[in-house]
Structure formats: structure tokens, C-alpha cells
Amino acid sequence: MQAIMKIKEEKGFEIRETPEPAIRHSNEVKLKVDVASICGTDHHMWVYDQWAQKRLPPTIPFIAGHEAGLEVVDIGPDVKNLQIGDKVSMECHEACGTCYQCRSDRMHICSNTKIFGVDRDGIFADYVVIPELNAVKNDNNLDPAIASLQDPLGNAVHTILPKDNVEDIAGKNILITGAGPIGLMAIPVVKMLGAGQVFVTAGGNNLLRLETAKKLGADMVLNAREEGDKIPKIIKDATDGVGVDVLLEMSGNIYALRHGLEALTYGGRVSLLGFFPGSIEFDINSLMISKGAAVYGIAGRRMFQTWQVMKGLLKSKDLQNKLKNNIITHRVNMSDWEKGMIEIHEKRAIKVVMDPFK
Amino acid sequence: MQAIMKIKEEKGFEIRETPEPAIRHSNEVKLKVDVASICGTDHHMWVYDQWAQKRLPPTIPFIAGHEAGLEVVDIGPDVKNLQIGDKVSMECHEACGTCYQCRSDRMHICSNTKIFGVDRDGIFADYVVIPELNAVKNDNNLDPAIASLQDPLGNAVHTILPKDNVEDIAGKNILITGAGPIGLMAIPVVKMLGAGQVFVTAGGNNLLRLETAKKLGADMVLNAREEGDKIPKIIKDATDGVGVDVLLEMSGNIYALRHGLEALTYGGRVSLLGFFPGSIEFDINSLMISKGAAVYGIAGRRMFQTWQVMKGLLKSKDLQNKLKNNIITHRVNMSDWEKGMIEIHEKRAIKVVMDPFK
Amino acid sequence: MQAIMKIKEEKGFEIRETPEPAIRHSNEVKLKVDVASICGTDHHMWVYDQWAQKRLPPTIPFIAGHEAGLEVVDIGPDVKNLQIGDKVSMECHEACGTCYQCRSDRMHICSNTKIFGVDRDGIFADYVVIPELNAVKNDNNLDPAIASLQDPLGNAVHTILPKDNVEDIAGKNILITGAGPIGLMAIPVVKMLGAGQVFVTAGGNNLLRLETAKKLGADMVLNAREEGDKIPKIIKDATDGVGVDVLLEMSGNIYALRHGLEALTYGGRVSLLGFFPGSIEFDINSLMISKGAAVYGIAGRRMFQTWQVMKGLLKSKDLQNKLKNNIITHRVNMSDWEKGMIEIHEKRAIKVVMDPFK
Amino acid sequence: MQAIMKIKEEKGFEIRETPEPAIRHSNEVKLKVDVASICGTDHHMWVYDQWAQKRLPPTIPFIAGHEAGLEVVDIGPDVKNLQIGDKVSMECHEACGTCYQCRSDRMHICSNTKIFGVDRDGIFADYVVIPELNAVKNDNNLDPAIASLQDPLGNAVHTILPKDNVEDIAGKNILITGAGPIGLMAIPVVKMLGAGQVFVTAGGNNLLRLETAKKLGADMVLNAREEGDKIPKIIKDATDGVGVDVLLEMSGNIYALRHGLEALTYGGRVSLLGFFPGSIEFDINSLMISKGAAVYGIAGRRMFQTWQVMKGLLKSKDLQNKLKNNIITHRVNMSDWEKGMIEIHEKRAIKVVMDPFK
């Protein structure tokens, strides 16, 4: 089969002919890729930035890609809850299953985790073989392009609902700092969960993202470049002086974090998804400690409560349409993957989906 | 001023001339009633059923009514967070503030609680005086008729979100057993909170309620009289054999409870709001214990997280319209209260709201 | 090897010679049994009561027993976190791993669960082979007799701490209804978790259990036969009229449940572990609903948070000594299993542990 | 009466004759001071450091002190749950009761809070008058010196149990960074709550604190001055490579925070109580975000769940003795307050308690 692969320790991906994978463990399933989409991580690997140079060499060469809508075409003898013909998405984290984290409902932060499309062959190809556990059944009529978005949508949902015991979206005011694909997807989700007012801040030159935030239902979109340090006051004025109940930090920008924490009400909740360029410096005394804030670091998505929540949310045609019409900005064939990658690199795309090789 | 009062230890209410109440404690506020609505409790007191005969005599005579949209017209010297002109709703439970329950975030089940319109003068009148704490500020442009519904809407929201640490509506399948005013209001609320499928069961002769349930967005409405013991299987078939994640019991009907628990998935959650006619009998082994169910008894509404959630939810015009168009079926002047009461008694009304005396 | 087996569809077990089990799946471990203990379930199977007659025939013949302290003697090629020589205990529930419950942190109530010693060969033998996941590593110096108690101790701990989001033992007053092995073990555990006052009620003719409850640290032990309906008042009088914060129902006795719920404070928490003889009847209105109680059905023990908690608790020599000196009342060789079983049958034993066949 | 007062905007306190306070609101109680203890805040005010210079001028002159064991000597007409003769401690935060925070179970971080002994007259005197709500009833036989410690003990308990939905001490490994009075008191408390291993780190020249940490039951006490960057590895080695489940940061030292976060397991929990000298800088990506940490800012103590937990914990004579023998290092008469203050200033004291003026 054909596959988009990382072959060399330098910038770039290449299309190569490679053997079709086969089931080797009794609990595995073989999946045909219906639609794939390109993640920011794929872009990092393509650029071969510092993170990629450190992480990738041991696994090169490998097939890239981990966001996909797929179909089960073969199952191992110990597969229990999937059948040939089932439509699935892929959870890209392969957990060990028996470490301290896995044994305590934290499989998504397993200390031995491997990632498909990074540590293992991914889904920029015709087929992939993964454990049954990593294949999550979709409603059979779900559009595979939407199915492929569940990986980043899952990041958004996990940021919004980080733990079983956090219930603070319904009727509450929410601030989302950052309007990349995940931040944007978070907007219709918090609206679906009954959020009161939804504020979004984003750095200013990318007007596409600010406009998309409005289309997706944000009550107030603030251009961080223009409003700067006025942001906390603007938000407090719009919330009877109380501030927001929840801060979803999706930018990895220190100013966004500081403004967000200033705009947070006493005892409010924060989820941190965005990665920062390096160490950060801020006034933890007033912004976290005396504020009584609850702050959650977010990694991946819960295996598999986040997926179960998504399955229910995606029964909404309205959410499906919002994702299709506003998040998926480009669609190409896998053989034209480089066109899509360049759209991302040039920040003209929010999400690029790819159809299988012709 | 005029007031609808319980005067005698027998069926009925009477309109009487009674002195306008005045602020007597420094933390009280005086409120003008903009709109009142009639609760099932008012109906019980009017009928003077067994519960009423046991509960009311010590406080007769008193002004009835506890659901209202009101406006602040005077404030005591120690009132801190309300001003004259503020629009408010009333929390009808007056908690003592210093008992074990009040000191542990359970003021709504205070062991010394008094209820306005039952133990204290209520709001079927021109004015009422209550502590600042019991007056909950609304957005000033909220329709007072909607404001008056927040008492039963709060019961619905508290049933749906019983505790800080329960977050299980988003993307989950929900069964609501019972379609009285509170059960019906729960439908658009769980939909707003991102519920997957919403099932509603109700006893069969009241088609108005079954039809209203559909209009309010239920995915499947089951007539309990017709479907009977088939209900659990119907629900499991519609949920991949899994059953519902959450049961909101709002009927006080033993068959509804049994069917609901059968339809509940292992480890699911139950909120019990409906009062049963007396002691009940059921198979607790299979329906609660080995099922690993989490069951919450619901009383009143949380003071005041439930109100804060409602305030945010009611920013939605869609929710406001659903309540106005489907829940409020009758509107009369207070001087015609008896007409409204009879509509309730004859089960032709869902909710009757009343304008102040002309 | 020798094994204590259920051979016939009638009362009794038999010692038989049977082949030593071997690793057949790559993720399995082979374990040598150091110490086994006899569970109430083993007694049910031996008696061959109604439950056993219904449940067992499909799996007969099989090796009984599921409580053990064991040692790893062989590992499959995909075993990741265990080594030969590790000391382990066995979680007796084999979950499917991929069903709705397993995918949402509820593996202990997996809908496809199989139980070692009931549905699969158990540990009343020299060796057993189980998946790595079901073998839980102990501190290597833990007495294997204590290790074997972790199955029922886990039931106690799970009853005490049913969910991540339940934290209500520290400084709170606790009522344990029932003083079988699990109820008794719960006493030192809640004491270790900082409980305020601990009340224990138990049916009266078994003075051994009442006396053991006192030795294990209960502040007040009430003989239910003698005190009867006075129990709720006695408990309220001892708690400033407030009642207990937590009820751990471990008896399966309807009177104990009713008394316990009456003694519970408003908004209190209940865990239900004890199985009742059949359907039960009680006043759910006053005892659960208006009381605002939170009631959790308990099945098994969490996989594997309960085990992680136990591992930490068992670092306490004091807890180890309490279990050894008060819970383990008899110790026999496996070849003398029938003596131990009769001690249990005659209610002279709390826990019987067995050493391997000589 | 006599009182220790802040009179001038400069270093120092003075003993003055001042009128005995009287009940002025119907919900107040008048309390006689049995024992007072000196808090670090009192020391700041005495030194008149930057914080004090900014905070105090508007309220000078005032009576200092907020940690006390007291007795009710008079009650207002609306006091409901206290009687003359009751022994109480004082919660020093006076919340407004009706703001957003107060209406959502976060009274301890009320946005309008006033503090007795800082914004209002405190308890370094014979009498004080406070609202009933702020007087928390003790068991009448509790030593008033222990009663006076409940203010800082409450900080410790709130740091350990920050929310209803956090239950992660039982059986878990805990790291306490900082061994001031609050950090030291946390040691026996986490031990009482069933902690597995308890690690304590503290800066090195104050051997009294390191030795006290050992006496109070810490499993491993690490001198941060000696061990430095080796601390995370030492802790991981002692926990099977897993790290601690919970970090209680009580030092306000950036190195302690970084080491603590490095020693934390994936998905672990952090409570931040210690105030830092200013803004801090650290690698939030690896230490919070990808680690999936849950971090809680801690302010004050919960009103009044923390007090209810303390009341239960203090039923333990063992805990009482540990506090009395290890935390209270000095006892003087109020007329000798300056001797006690100097012991604190010279870091020779852990806690100084004071008897009323002779």
C-alpha cells in the first residue's frame, strides 16, 4: 500500500510503497482509513522542529498521521466488542494497561505510552492495525470526516471536562484563550453544555480565527493584540464584576494565561492545554493561591470517557454542521498531502482533511 | 393590601385585606410581586389533603404562594448586595444559617428550615418581606413570568445536577420518569447540557403532557400505560444494549422507579425527586447494589448554586421560549386565582401564572 | 497438582489431582499459592444453596477459591510490570476490557465479567494462571495470610470509599450495620481514615462478633437484638442530635437498613454492600428523598484504586496486627479444608486461612 | 478591659485599657478568651513589614490576635444554636453572606471578607464580640490551648482536603514541603487519614523543625539544604519509581515547589498554601500540563466543613497530645506577650500560647 512516511532526519514527508500491515496479536483489529486529517503534531514532524529532532529519530522511518475515520476490515480471535464493518475512530495513545497510572483510571497519562503516528505506524495510509481497545466505535452513519476530528475534539472536550468530579460549565461564564482548531472546537461544545457567556481571546493577525470564533457562537471575541491588558476588566464588566467561572487556556501564551487568571473569579477553575514556549513567570500568589483556583493540567483525552461524551454530543446535527462548515477548511487527496500541509504552515487553514489515495 | 390566604382548617383559600408587611430586621428586603405562579404545594394546601391537615394548622392564617418574579422596593440597613429596583426571584426555604447542615453547604436541607407561603407569609399578595439571602437577583430584562418559574425549574436543575461532583449529562443518555411541570422542564435543560438521547415515560391518560414532552425535545416519549414492562427493553434496544446513564425519577410511581432502575446501565446515576404514595417495595439487590448505582435523594434546590446555574441557562432565549410556550398554559389575575386552581385540579393546566391584583 | 474442586451438582467439595495450569496467553502470569482463605462465597458453593444451584452448573467441575497470597513463578512474553519472584494478591474479577463499563473506569462492574474460583479455576490449589492485570503486586515482606485477606478487605475499603469524589470519613461519625468479616474489617479502616465516632450494630446471638467489633476499635457496639428500634435515638443522642454522616450497610438486614437510614444526618452518605434475602420495603420518601441522602450500591472493589489504597493502608503494622489477631480466627492445611469450612458453617470462625497442601 | 493593640503605624504592639465590647446585632455572641495563640500574621503586624504597612493603616488602632479558645458569656436574641457556657473557637474570616462566592459554598473566599484581629478587633483581650456563625462549638472538655490551634490546624486540614471531591490521602504517598507550624501539623493529620508514606522537606538550619517533623510521624524528613536537587530522585526511589500522589506545598519556596512537582506522579494532586516572595518562574509544560496535575490554591479554611472535620479528628487523644507536646513550645501570660513574640521572631518557637491577663 501507499503511505505518507517520515523517512529522513530532516524536514519533509515522503509517499512510499510499504507492506499492508497484518494482525499479529489476538486482540488487534485491522482498519481501513476512510478519511484522515492533519494535526499540528504532523506539522511539527514535517517541519522537523526541536521537539521532533529530539523525539523522532529512534522510530524513523514510520508512517505519520493519527487523526482518522476508519472501518474495521479484520479482527483478531480475542476481539470481543467489535465486528468487521464497524466504523471507528482511533485513540492514538497506546497505554501499557498495567502500570500505576493505568491501574488508577489514568490510562491517558500512562507512563509507558506509545503514540500511533509518532512511536508506531500511523494512519496516513490505506490500512493500520491497532489493539481493539484503541478503536472506538462510532455511529455507523457518522461522516468519516467528522469522525477524524474526534482526536482534537477530544482534546477540547477533555479540557472542558477534565475529571469526573468537575461540573462547572452549565450556566457558568467561560473564557477560552486561544483560537486554534482545539480552542475553536471548544466554543460550540461549551455552548452545548449550557454555558452562560463564552469569551474568546486570540492573537490578532489571524482574522480567520477571530471570525470563526464568532460564527461558532462566542458571545464576545477579543483581539488580544488590540485589547491587551484591558481584557480582564472588559470581562469583569460583562459579568457583574464577578469574572469567569472557568478558564480554558488553549494558547500557550503567557499573556493569555495572566489575563485569563486575572479574569477568573475566586474559586474558579482552570484547564491548561496549551504548551508554552518555555518556562513561564507569573504571580502565583494572587493569581492562583489566594484566589483559591483549581488548575488542571490536560494531556490527551480520557480513555475513554471523553470518547463516550463525544459520541453523545455528536448525535447533534447542529454540532456536526458547525464542525464541517467552520473547522474543516480544506479537503485534499492523500497524494496531495503537501498542498494541505502548506495551507497549515501558512496559517490559511484551520483543519485539512484528506481522502485515501486514489 | 390584598392577599390570597389560608384562613380556615378546611378546603379553600380566601382573598383578604391584610396589612402591607414592613422590614423588621436589618438584613431584610421588601419586594413587590410582579408575577406569581401556582405550585402543586399550593394545590395541596387548597384541597387541604392529609399532608396539609398535618402541616398547616400551627401557621394558619397565612398568605399562600412561593413562586414569584419580584422587584426590590425597600432594603434594610445591613443589606449588602441588592438595591432598590433590582429584579429578583425568591428562594422559598429560609434556613437557620448555623446548624450542622447550614455549616456544611447543605442549607437547602437545613434542619430548622421554614418555607415562605407555608410556614411564613407567601407571595400571593402585593408585597412580601424576606431576608436578602432569599432574594436572588435576576437579569433585569428577564420576563417576570419566567422568573416565577425558577422555583420549580430549580427543582429540575437540582435533580439533574445534584452535587458539585456529579457531571454525567454531557453526551449521556437520560431517562426522565414523569412528565409533570418539573419533569417537563427537565427535558430542555438536559438537552441544553448536551445530553445524548432523552427518554421520557409518563402515565397514559394525560396526552397533553406526552405531547408537550415531545415538543420540548424528548427523543422518545413512552406512554407507560401502553408500554408497561416493555419499557426497559425498549430503552436498552435504543442504546446499544447499554441502558441509560442517568435516571431522573420525577413521578413518585413505583413502576416508573422499577422500570427506570432496570433501564439504568451498571454504575449509572439516579436522582429521586418524586414523592411516593407510601412505603415502596423493590429488588434492591439487583436494581441498586450489584448494579453499582449512585442514588441521590433530592429536596428543594441548592442555595444557591442551583440558582447560579439557572441564571446562566436562562440567558438562552430558546430556553425562555420553550418555558413560555409549553410550560405556562394559563395566565389569570390574582383576583381570579380560583379559575387557575381549578385548571390545575382538573389537570388541564401545566403551569398557571397570575398577575397582581388589579 | 492437588486442588479443592467442585465436582458434583450437590453439597460438597473434593480434593482431586489435576494438571498444573500453564500460560496460554502472552499477557498471563503463573502464580504459586502461598496462603488461601475461605470466603462466604466458597461456603455458598459448598452448601450448594439456591444461588449456587443457579450459577454453578455451567462451569462444574472447577477449582474453588479466590482469596490468596501468591508468588509469581512464570510470566508470558507481553507481561510488562511483574517479575518472577514478585509477591501478589489476586483480583478475582476478570473484566473484558472493552465494553462500555470497562471503557469508563468501571471495570469492576464489567458486563462480561468472569470470576476466578467461580467461572474459572480458582486458587484452592498449588498454582493458578491469570492475566497480569489481575495480579496485584504486594510489598514483598507482607505476610501472605494478610495478602489473602485483601479480597474482602477490598470490599470493605470500596464500601468506605466508593468513588473518587466521595471524601467523608475524616472527622465524621460512621455507622456500620453488620459485623461479618467485611463489616469487622471496616472498623479499623475507618478509624485509620480519621473517623470521629464509629458505631457498629449487629444481630445479637453471635457475641464473638460484637466483642471483636469492640476490640477493633468501635466506639459503640449495639446489639440489634437487644436495642431494636431504640438504635436511631441512641446514635442521635451520642452525636449532638445530628446523626451519623455515613452509613455502611453490611448486613443485608432490612431492620438494620431502616435504623441506619433513620440515624443518618440530612445529606448523609450510604454505601450498600450487604445483600438482602429478597425484595425490601421501606419509606423511601423520608429515609432517602427528603433526607437528601447519597446512596451507593457496592459491587466488588475498584480495579485498581481500591488495591492501591489498601497497599498504602497495609504499610501500617497496627492494621496488619488487628487483622491477624482478630479477623483470622483459624488456620488449617488445605488438606483439612473441611474442618475450616465447618467452623465457618457453625459460625465459630470469622476468617479461616489455609496453607498449601503438604 | 486590657488588650494587646496595634496603635501606631510602626513596629510594635501595646497593652491598653479599652472598653469591653457589647453585643450590638441580634445575631452576635460575646466571648471570653480562655487561651490565645500567636500567628505568623500577628508577627508580620508587629514587625510592621511591607504587607502590614499596606494593609493596616485604615484599621489602626485595633486589638490584634485571631487564634483563641473561648467561652460564650452572652448571646443576642436571634442566636439559634449556641448557649451561654458553650466552649468555642473563632473562625477569623467574617464573610458578607450574600455575594457570588458566599452563595456558592465558597464563603472562605468571600470577596468582601473582613478578618478579626486585622480589619476588626481581635482576641488578644479579655472579651470579643462576633456573629454566631463565626463561633464554632467545641467539645466542652477540649483543652482551650488546643482549641486555639484550630485556626492554623484548619489551614493544614484545608490544604489536605481542599474540596468535597478530593479524596486522595488514604493509602497514598504524600510530600509536605515546608515545616512551619502548619506544615508540621499536617503530618499527624495525613497520618490519621491513612496516608502511606509521608515525606517532609524543609530548609536546613532550623533543626528544631526537622526533628519535630520526625517526632510527629514523618516517614522520611529531607533537609533541603543538604539534599537539594536530589530530592525528587530520593522520593521516587522510595515509591517504586512512581512518585508521590499528593504534594502539600507549605513553604512558599520556589525550589521546594519545583522539586515537589518533579516528585509528583502523573495525574497527582497539589495544594498550594505557602506564599512566595514574589512572582515565580517554572517549567509549567512538564511539571503541570503534560503531567496532568490537579493544583488547588488554598486560602483560609472552609466555612465550616474544615471545622467539622477538625472536630472529629480532635476526638483523638493521640492527635491532641501530638499538638500539645510538639507544636506548643511556649506558654506565657498575655501581659508577657512580647517575650513570646521574640521567641517567634528568633525562630526558637513553633507555637506560643498565651493565658488571659492576670
Image (cartoon, coloured by chain):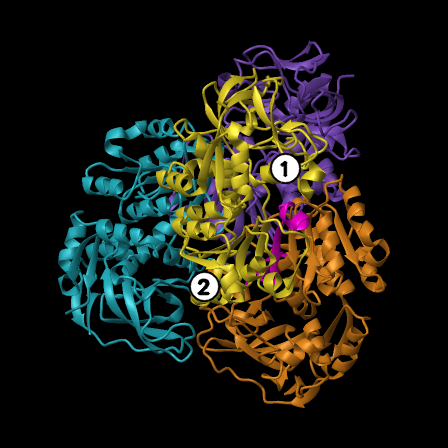
Chain colours: A yellow, B cyan, C purple, D orange
The residue under the point 58% across, 54% down is A295
Q: Position of residue B53 (x, y in %)?
A: 25, 56
**Residue D103: which disc?**
2
Examine the structure image and report whether residue D308 is included in the region drawn in magenta.
yes
- Whether marks 1 and 2 lie on the same chain: no
- Residue closest to the eye, C314 or D99: D99
Q: Which residues are magenta?
A: D285-313
What residue is at 37 percent from the left and 56 percent from the top? B310
- Residue type (three-letter) at the residue carrying disc 1: Met
Q: Are marks 1 and 2 in contact (CB under 8 Å)?
A: no
- Badge 1 element: helix
B40 sits to left or right of D205: left
Which element type, helix, strand or loop, lies under badge 2? helix
Name the residue: 76% across, 61% down. D179
Residue toward you, C99 or C202: C99
Quadrant where the image shows the N terminus of chain A:
top right
Q: Label 2 sits on what residue type?
A: Arg
Name the spot of residue B179 as percent of width and height, x first: 27, 43
Judging by the rendered image, the residue that carries numbered circle 1 is: A45
